[in-house]
Amino acid sequence: QVQLQESGPGLVKPSETLSLTCTVSGGSVSSGSHYWSWIRQPPGKGLEWIGYIYYSGSTNYNPSLKSRVTISVDTSKDQFSLKLRSVTAADTAVFYCARIAWAAAAGSGYYYYMDVWGKGITVTVSS
Amino acid sequence: DIQMTQSPSSLSASVGDRVTITCRASQSISSYLNWYQEKPGKAPNLLIYGASSLQSGVPSRFSGSGSGTDFTLTISSLKPEDSASYFCQQSYSTPWTFGQGTKVEIK
């Protein structure tokens, strides 16, 4: 059974870079059958999709964060990572990593969905 | 971005009740709609994908319906372990967006 685990510092200073890693166990980021994603939830607010990566390194980012975000993958360690630059207090959130699967949609296209999630890690931006 | 609006934001129901949660998209998203369950301190759990397909391992009391802009998640007979938050998510176009969530409490 695939499990995801987020890791990284729980406290980051304003203007610095937030760095998180998601470790995949019971599976492989190189499977080719999945994408790998980051999502966050600020306190008292809804979920926000940050972006995803394929094992090949191709990425798709939320335009609202694109200028500050980098998602990378390390296939040798079965990990993928998030870097968010120039953070402010507004970036305080619970960060989740998730696996994305897909299924053929009726007619054409694919349904994409996040079928495995990590438990989340709380990151506070404060001096 | 496609806005997802859930209602109600919270509800309280008794064990055995039929519970319905609604999710509305700001534009048509066909059937590209997923539902998740979230409990404190636990990883979110996929319930429904493609608006109505039950994820493997999810109890059959959960069902989803709808297409276009209006969708529903139904719990046919509420159980104590269903006390959780539920949220919808569209995968029709990036950036993927989520509803604000519905908190379900057991009376």
Image (cartoon, rainbow, N blue to C red):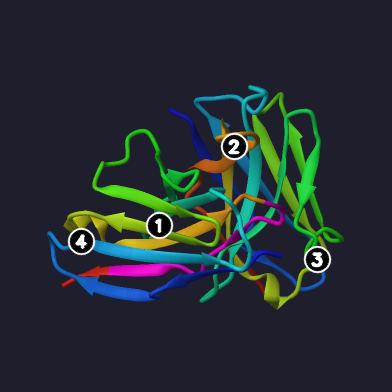
Q: Is residue A55 magenta?
A: no
The residue positioned 40% from the left and 75% from the top of the image is B9
Task: Give how far apart the Cα atoms at labels 1 and 3 are.
Answer: 30 Å
- Quadrant in which residue A17 is drawn: bottom right
Q: Which residue is mark 1?
A: B38
For label 3, the SS is loop
Q: What stretch of residues is rendered in magenta?
A: B93-104
Mark 1 residue crowding within 10 angstroms, few (<14) / some (14–19) / many (20+): many
Q: Which residue is mark 2?
A: A23
Q: Which is closer to the viewer, label 1 or label 2?
A: 1
Q: Which is closer to the viewer, label 3 or label 2?
A: 2
Amino acid type, residue under disc 4 in the picture: Arg
Callout 2: residue from which chain?
A
Residue A107 appears at what percent x and percent y? 60, 34
For label 1, the SS is strand
Residue A13 appears at what percent x and percent y? 74, 70
Task: Give how far apart the Cα atoms at labels 3 and 2 are.
Answer: 23 Å
Q: Earlier in the sequence, mark 3 or mark 2?
A: 3
Callout 3: residue from which chain?
A
User: What quarter of the picture does the C terminus of chain B occupy?
Assistant: bottom left
For label 2, the SS is strand
Q: Which residue is mark 3?
A: A16
